Image (tube, rainbow, N blue to C red):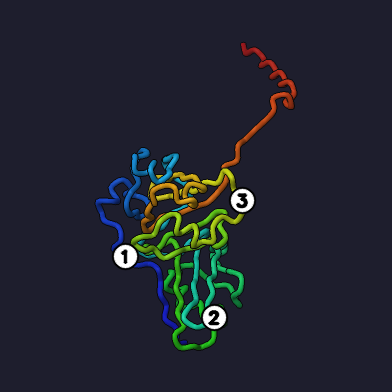
């Protein structure tokens, strides 16, 4: 196979000083503050909070993949074969994105191993100039975009990558969302922006950092009518104890 495997898992991105607040979690670059700063407000941020959710970029010595990890393989360099494959690793530790011939085993495998095995699993022909690039939980040179956008997945980070630019690059919102919001997870913080403000360009540009996770969603207001509620039932009296 005349294939060059490029694995988005370069090291040396995060400085040790930046990890002081996150000794036992994923690496982080440009840690967000604990409260909304004037700079964040000028960029359209409306809320910042602690984050302890499921999304993490991992950093372990073995770099083995796990159930639930999101993997993306980009094939490029040869017209007609260029395509992006995106899927989660299932509970049986197989990666089965749509369009490949056979599932790829991920037990005790790394992203680099996936890059090497992918051409055979996808049935790609031998072609000079064909490149395979893998992004996943050990990548350190990218951001990930999810939620309600047209093209979810990993995107290579660049020095001037703004929040608006990455949302537009992902195809924008997948539907009309009057109350649309964007959340950016960075380390142990999540900051929220109004989708309309970011896309309209009326606010200062928010620069993304490597390992940022961006999600587009719509805030749903929970409403209820108390008149629709029945009378609460009386709780049975507890028997007296002697």
Q: Classify mark 2: helix, strand or loop.
A: loop
Which badge, 2 or 3, is on the more N-terminal residue? Answer: 2
Counting from the top left corner in percent of width and height, residue 231 is at 73, 20
- Looking at the image, which residue is at 43% across and 44% down? 44
- What residue is rendered at 57% in x and 46% in y? 218
Q: Which residue is mark 1?
A: 11
Q: Are marks 3 and 1 in contact (CB under 8 Å)?
A: no
**In the picture provided, is 17 more to the left or to the right than 31?**
left
- For the residues labelled 2 and 1, the Cα–Cα distance comes to 29 Å
Q: Earlier in the sequence, mark 3 or mark 1?
A: 1
Query: Is disc 2 surrounded by few (<14), some (14 to 19) or many (20+) residues within 10 Å?
Result: few
* Residue at the image point whose x is 44% and y is 40% from the top: 46
Q: Is residue 44 above or below residue 134?
A: above
Choose mark 3 or mark 1, whichever is in front: 3
In the image, 121 versus 79, the foreground residue is 79
Q: Relative to residue 242, is residue 166 drawn left or right?
A: left
Secondary structure of residue under mark 3: loop
Q: Position of residue 135 (x, y in %)?
A: 45, 67
Q: Which residue is mark 3?
A: 176
How would you rate the neighbour count of disc 1 (Cα within 10 Å): few for under 14, some for 14-19, many for 20 or more? few
Which quadrant holds residue 59? bottom left
First in residue order: circle 2 vs circle 1: 1
Number of other residues with Cα within 10 Å of mark 3, as a class: few under 14, some 14 to 19, many 20 or more:
few
Callout in the foreground (2, 1): 2
Identify the secondary structure beneath mark 1: loop
What residue does disc 2 label?
81
Q: How far is the residue under mark 2 from the one under mark 3? A: 33 Å
């Amino acid at each position: 196979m005349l294939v060059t495997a490029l694995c988005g898992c370069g090291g040396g991105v995060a400085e040790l000083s930046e990890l002081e607040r996150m000794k036992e979690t994923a690496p982080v670059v440009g840690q967000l503050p604990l409260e909304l700063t004037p700079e964040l407000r000028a960029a359209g941020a409306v809320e910042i909070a602690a984050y302890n959710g499921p999304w993490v970029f991992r950093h372990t010595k073995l770099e083995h993949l796990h159930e639930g990890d999101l993997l993306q393989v980009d094939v490029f360099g040869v017209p007609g074969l260029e395509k992006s494959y995106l899927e989660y690793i299932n509970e049986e530790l197989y990666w089965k994105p749509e369009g490949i011939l056979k599932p790829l085993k991920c037990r005790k495998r790394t992203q680099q191993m996936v890059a090497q095995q992918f051409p055979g699993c996808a049935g790609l022909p031998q072609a000079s100039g064909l490149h395979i690039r893998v992004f996943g939980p050990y990548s350190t040179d990218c951001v990930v975009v999810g939620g309600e956008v047209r093209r979810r997945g990993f995107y290579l980070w660049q020095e001037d990558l703004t929040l608006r630019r990455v949302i537009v690059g992902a195809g924008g919102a997948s539907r009309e969302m009057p109350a649309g919001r964007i959340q950016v997870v960075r380390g142990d913080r999540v900051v929220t922006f109004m989708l309309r403000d970011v896309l309209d360009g009326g606010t200062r540009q928010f620069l993304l950092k490597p390992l940022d996770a961006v999600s587009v969603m719509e805030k749903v207001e929970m409403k209820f009518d108390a008149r629709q509620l029945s009378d609460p039932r009386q709780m049975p009296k507890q028997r007296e104890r002697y």
